[in-house]
Amino acid sequence: MKFLINFLLLISLFTVNTTRASLIEADLSEDAYISYQGMDWAWASPNNLQFIGCAGPENTEGYLDKVYDNDNDVCANQLMAPQYHENWRYATAAELDILINDIGLASFFASSGSLIQAAAYWNTAYRTVDIGDFISGYIASGWGASGYETFYVRDHETVVSEPSSLLLFSLMICLLAFRLRA
């Protein structure tokens, strides 16, 4: 019996297929980004190249939000454009200055000590980011810089109450106060 188990284990080592993790297509969970002064910030990737480890397609524009799938040219990683998730965009140079000078690395740590990052939402293979690159100032948004951390942003959605809702709420408080006096 022991011989059979060892034999099956040996055979399984030669027949294992590697699989790639798939992108998370759902909207980002609230623990995958931070909010600062009316904007959401997502630490999207530990590298700033669209295709890593492959030649990629001739027309890369067609693959901004679609996975490049070619059996003859398999990529180690593909970084999707920010629009892969609704309302996200590239950060401007001025916004990246805010990231470096005002927000800083400490803001990307949750109270539990875990890193707040969204690599699994925009990468076909990467699942985490590189703190060392952030500390060294290797930060970008638009593609083209190998070894730079990638950040995407979106305008933070705030819910503003309608004036009629505020009026109705105020009226109910006044009626409640009047009733309590009577």
Image: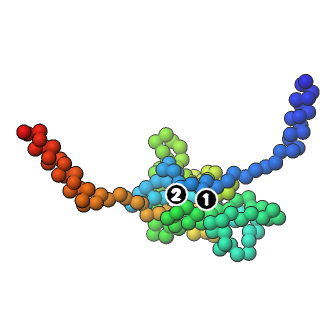
Helix, strand or loop status at disc 2: strand
Name the foreground residue: 182 vs 137. 182
The residue carrying pointer 2 sits among few (fewer than 14), some (14 to 19) or many (20 or more) residues within 10 Å by Cα, namely many
Query: Residue 37 appears in which quarter of the rendering?
Result: bottom left
Name the foreground residue: 137 vs 71. 71
Residue 105 appears in the picture as rendered? no
Name the foreground residue: 40 vs 143. 40
Instruction: Name above or below for residue 180 compared with residue 132.
Output: above
Residue 56: x and y in percent read 74, 69
Residue type, mark 1 in image:
Trp
User: In which quadrant is the N terminus drawn?
Assistant: top right
* Residue with the mark numbered 1: 122
Image point (14%, 48%), residue name: 174
User: In which quadrant is the C terminus drawn?
Assistant: top left
Image point (83%, 45%), residue name: 16
In this rendering, position of residue 2 left or right of residue 168: right
> Do labels 2 and 1 touch, CB within 8 Å?
yes
Residue 42: mark: 2
Looking at marks 2 and 1 on the same chain, the residue that comes earlier in the sequence is marked by 2
Residue 79: x and y in percent read 64, 62
Residue type, mark 2 in image:
Ala
Residue 160: x and y in percent read 32, 59
Query: Residue 123 appears in which quarter of the rendering?
Result: bottom right
In this view, the mark in front (2 or 1): 1
